[in-house]
């Protein structure tokens, strides 16, 4: 197998934009991508290009007058056709040797690496990511391809089982069938690529429904997969509204599994619909669902306050707070509360907000007008539930901007403490002591990420056992999970804890078959 000599997995290094050559290369990529704005993208099902005429217009959230891409939307009938086509392609694709699928995925990683700055630029323009945030997203997509290629190599052969005398006993992993892949817009390349790569490299065929906010990035990734050799029939990119085609592909009797990342409410709906067997369906659908977060950082009495301020700042306002791992609650021991809050508010006020393509801006826009309105309405609620100490108003004109907003003295019953806002809004809450802080951190329906800033080993031990989140960090920010290093996934309403980028992940896309042969 061509993959036998694969090197050990290493995370993709990120580009340093402070180097003039890299800065110039990125400026050039931005210019080139801008010249490709407004292109029309058709649907492709089973190798056939289809123009429906009903179009989705994707805009630049830094300047919504600019059209990034125009995409033909699928109908319910085409959604059905996409699942049927994936079903028809499954027998052939599932029997393609694993080594060949792995080679294609490594090729996809190579192509992404070669086109890295171009992808960075698409992320800047379609998702409103600043340069370093875009670069982190593309690097993570490359990591997923490289990591899952290696994981598939590990899982492709016979697995170790006990041998019964007089038998040859084996256990092998086989794919499931047709997978529906539904990513969110906030990691429009990394999560889309990660879930799609996992589905395909394990031998499943896939119907991928990208977010309506970021269809162009998805179309560009589909180009990469085809160039890497994935057959046209192995996957369909089904652009369309989640509400219009989502239910159809989730409910289709030939759909075998759904890999979803997105909000709690949509995840719960998918889980419910998938649980009901449809006429002709002969399996229980598997649902892999990674959902929202209301992530907390606890600042202990003896923490290094400056370090905690920087950790909270980066976690709360990086990518405008639009990460499932974003810190939206800082729970601070009363002894350092005032000092922490003053320093944090001063630093937040100094963060520059503006168009994402201008590298001087630390924060770009939020994703859409709908998101902007919803976040501003949460800020109004927060004004009644606490004390606004930074931000609190609409941001600069022209794009969907909101300045970093901090609401202090928030009680755990408050909406801004309990509900996922998904924007640059941080609630700060005072804790009596560490025990109280931990109880407040766990007072949530979610359980995705969390962090503790403390120099007290007993407190860190306590948090290790009792802070109920899938990804826990000590004395560092709670965002920025790395593939292979921090397998990612949450507890409770944050999802099924699938640990993307970890050694358990591909098993979710496979089923095990035991084969025993009598030999004597
Ligand atoms: P969303 O739930 O609105 O949409 C996610 C995807 O589901 C989109 O592609 C959307 O088109 C689709 N969809 C919408 N309605 C559907 C339906 N009825 N059937 C099928 N699909 C449907 O979420 P979003 O706004 O795109 O993303 C933000 C959310 O994602 C936040 O809650 C965030 O916390 C979460 N998220 C979680 C993780 C994680 O790993 N846990 C990672 C990233 C984002």
Image (cartoon, grey):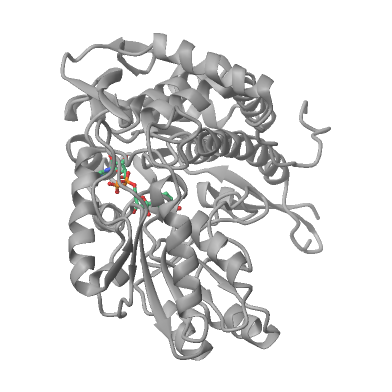
Q: Is 106 left, or right, of 428 in this rendering?
A: right
Q: Residue at x 30, y 80 (%)?
A: 411
Look at the picture and state if 251 lies above or below 135.
below
Whole-percent x, y for residue 499 in the image: 55, 56
Look at the picture and state if 120 lies above or below 195.
above
Whole-percent x, y for residue 168 in the image: 77, 53
Look at the picture and state if 486 lies above or below 238.
below
Whole-percent x, y for residue 13 in the image: 70, 36
Q: Quadrant of the C terminus?
A: bottom right
Look at the picture and state if 419 lies above or below 371.
below
Whole-percent x, y for residue 502 in the image: 62, 53
**Is 77 in front, or is 299?**
299
**Is 304 in front, or is 181?**
304
Q: Is 122 left, or right, of 174 in this rendering?
A: left
Q: Quadrant of the N terminus?
A: top right
Q: Residue at x 45, y 89 (%)?
A: 436
Q: Which image quadrant is residue 303 in?
A: bottom right
């Amino acid at each position: 197998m061509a993959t036998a000599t694969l090197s050990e997995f290493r995370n993709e290094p990120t580009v340093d934009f402070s180097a003039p050559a890299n800065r110039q290369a990125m400026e050039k990529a931005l210019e080139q991508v801008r010249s490709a704005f407004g292109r029309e993208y058709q649907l492709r099902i089973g190798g056939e290009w289809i123009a429906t005429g009903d179009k989705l217009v994707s805009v630049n959230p830094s300047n919504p007058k600019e059209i990034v891409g125009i995409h033909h939307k699928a109908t319910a009938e085409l959604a059905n056709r996409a699942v049927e086509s994936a079903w028809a392609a499954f027998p052939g694709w599932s029997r393609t040797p694993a080594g060949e699928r792995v080679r294609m995925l490594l090729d996809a990683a190579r192509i992404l690496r070669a086109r890295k700055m171009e992808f960075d630029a698409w992320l800047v323009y379609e998702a409103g990511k600043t340069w370093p945030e875009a670069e982190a997203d593309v690097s993570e997509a490359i990591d997923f391809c490289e990591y899952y290629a290696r994981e598939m190599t590990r899982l492709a052969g016979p697995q170790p089982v006990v041998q019964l005398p007089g038998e040859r006993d084996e256990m092998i992993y086989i794919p499931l069938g047709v997978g529906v892949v539904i990513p969110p817009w906030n990691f429009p390349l990394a999560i889309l690529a990660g879930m799609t790569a996992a589905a395909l490299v394990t031998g499943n065929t896939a119907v991928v429904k990208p977010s309506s906010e970021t269809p162009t990035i998805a179309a560009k990734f589909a180009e990469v997969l085809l160039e890497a050799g994935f057959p046209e029939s192995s996957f369909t990119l089904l652009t369309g509204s989640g509400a219009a085609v989502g239910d159809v592909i989730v409910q289709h009797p030939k759909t075998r599994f759904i890999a979803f990342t997105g909000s709690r409410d949509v995840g719960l709906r998918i889980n419910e619909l998938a649980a009901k067997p449809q006429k002709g369906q002969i399996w229980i659908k598997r649902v892999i669902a990674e959902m929202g977060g209301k992530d907390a950082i606890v600042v202990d009495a003896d923490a290094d306050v400056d370090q905690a301020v920087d950790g909270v700042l980066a976690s709360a306002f990086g990518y405008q707070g639009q990460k499932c791992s974003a810190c939206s609650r800082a729970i601070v021991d009363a002894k350092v509360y005032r000092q922490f809050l003053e320093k944090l508010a001063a630093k937040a006020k100094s963060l520059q907000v503006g168009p994402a393509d201008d590298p001087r801006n630390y924060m770009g826009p939020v994703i859409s007008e709908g998101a902007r309105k919803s976040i501003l309405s949460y800020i109004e609620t927060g004004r009644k539930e606490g004390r606004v100490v930074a931000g609190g108003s609409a941001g600069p004109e022209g794009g969907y901007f909101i300045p970093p907003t901090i609401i202090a003295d928030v009680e755990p019953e408050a909406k801004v403490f309990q509900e996922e806002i998904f924007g640059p809004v941080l609630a700060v809450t005072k804790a009596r002591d560490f025990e109280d802080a931990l109880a407040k951190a766990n007072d949530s329906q979610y359980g995705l990420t969390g962090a503790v800033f403390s120099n007290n080993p007993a407190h860190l031990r306590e948090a290790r056992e009792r802070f109920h989140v899938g990804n826990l960090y000590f004395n560092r920010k709670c965002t920025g999970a790395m593939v292979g290093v921090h397998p990612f996934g949450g507890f409770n309403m944050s999802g099924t804890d699938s640990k993307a980028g970890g050694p358990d992940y591909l098993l979710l896309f496979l089923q095990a078959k035991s084969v025993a042969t009598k030999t004597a």
